[in-house]
Image (spheres, rainbow, N blue to C red):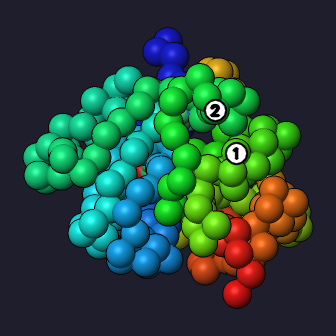
């Protein structure tokens, strides 16, 4: 059996961009919300768990002055992202680092990523960390962005009540039907992942728990600009508005 890193999702990387859009309702809309929360004049952006580069591409399109430093621990996802970024002509504004963001949270100096980012973003990656590491990562992000900097994360969240488990599941099934596919067909392309570094299979927390961790980590303003059933975009600013 092929062993995947948590978050690689598909056995074949080339299936990711289509498959994730079939698996998750409103994937593009969710990523676009993150880009809209960034001022278009944003310069230095750190992306954690960039995968095949879909969020990077949307940011580079929307923010003409942005330099994106993208981190991911999967060589095959980074390779795929790099070729898409180059094909789109953004190679001078995008660089990548092969590393575990849990490692970065524990030992930031080791990776030499630097500080003073205007923003940090992430999508569908941080939920692989246990809550203790999520909090450490949020603290690290808080010390790595500028005083007016922001952090936005899109991730699945733990349903607030057992009743909602079925509601959220039904919404995903309905979405797949609308894409003229069944979830079983998409899931046939999904591989089995094993713990890798600090990440393991889904370690979901409620939206409320995320917001509390962010506030405790130093984000003075926390917000949820988007939520759709079991998916949310949340984050905030270090400063108070
Ligand atoms: C589901 S993909 C999402 C990719 C992209 N952000 C998107 O929204 O399409 C999750 C990505 O996070 C990466 N990832 C998961 N845990 C990680 C960790 N601890 N350190 C670095 N990358 C990680 C995986 O390799 C994968 O590329």
Measuring 32% from the left and 54% from the top, which residue is drawn there? 67
Q: Is residue 11 left or right of residue 116?
A: left
Circle 2 crowding by C-alpha within 10 Å: few under 14, some 14–19, many from 20: some
* Spot occupied by residue 235 in the image (x, y as percentages of width and height): 66, 67
Q: Depth check: give the residue in front, 43 or 186.
A: 43
Across and down, in percent, residue 112 comes to 51, 30
Quarter of the image that includes the C terminus: bottom right
Per the image, the residue denoted by label 2 is 108
Q: Quadrant of residue 80?
A: top left
Q: Is mark 2 within 8 Å of ligand 1?
A: no
Q: Secondary structure at mark 2?
A: helix
Whole-percent x and y of residue 70?
41, 43
Q: Are marks 1 and 2 in contact (CB under 8 Å)?
A: yes
Mark yes or no: residue 86 visible: yes
Q: Nearer the viewer, residue 110 or 36?
A: 110
Circle 1 residues within 10 Å: few <14, some 14–19, many ≥20:
many
**Location of residue 131 with respect to 171 vertically, above or below:** above
Residue 202, compared with residue 78, is above or below; it is below
Q: CA distance from mark 1 to mark 2?
A: 8 Å
The percent coordinates of residue 17 (x first, y second) are 32, 49
Q: Quadrant of residue 200?
A: top right
Residue at 24 percent of width and 37 percent of height? 82
Helix, strand or loop for disc 1:
helix
Q: Nearer the viewer, residue 9 or 37?
A: 37
For residue 149, side relative to residue 33 (left or right)? right
Residue at 65%, 57% in the rendered image: 156
Mark 1 sits on what residue?
140
Name which residue lies at 78% across and 73% down: 220
| Count of numbered circles in the view | 2
Rendered view: 104 above or below 241: above
């Amino acid at each position: 059996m092929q062993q995947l890193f948590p978050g690689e999702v598909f056995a074949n990387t080339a299936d990711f961009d289509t498959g994730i859009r079939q698996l998750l309702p409103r994937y593009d809309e969710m990523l676009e919300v993150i880009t809209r929360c960034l001022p278009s004049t944003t310069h230095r952006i750190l992306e954690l768990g960039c995968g095949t580069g879909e969020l990077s591409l949307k940011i580079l399109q929307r923010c003409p002055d942005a330099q994106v430093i993208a981190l991911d621990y999967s060589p095959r996802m980074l390779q795929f992202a790099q070729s898409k970024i180059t094909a789109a002509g953004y190679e001078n504004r995008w660089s990548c680092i092969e590393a575990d963001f849990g490692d970065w949270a524990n030992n930031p100096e080791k990776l030499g990523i630097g500080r003073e980012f205007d923003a940090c973003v992430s999508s569908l990656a941080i939920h692989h960390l246990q809550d203790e590491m999520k909090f450490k990562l949020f603290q690290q992000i808080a010390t790595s962005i500028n005083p007016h900097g922001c952090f936005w994360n899109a991730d699945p969240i733990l349903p607030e009540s057992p009743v909602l488990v079925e509601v959220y599941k039904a919404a995903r099934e309905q979405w797949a039907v609308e894409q003229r596919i069944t979830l079983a067909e998409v899931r046939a392309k999904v591989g089995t992942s094993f713990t890798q570094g600090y990440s393991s299979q889904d370690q979901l927390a409620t939206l409320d728990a995320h917001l509390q961790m962010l506030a405790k980590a130093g984000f003075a303003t926390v917000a949820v600009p988007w939520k759709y059933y079991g998916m949310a975009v949340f984050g905030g600013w270090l400063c108070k508005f």
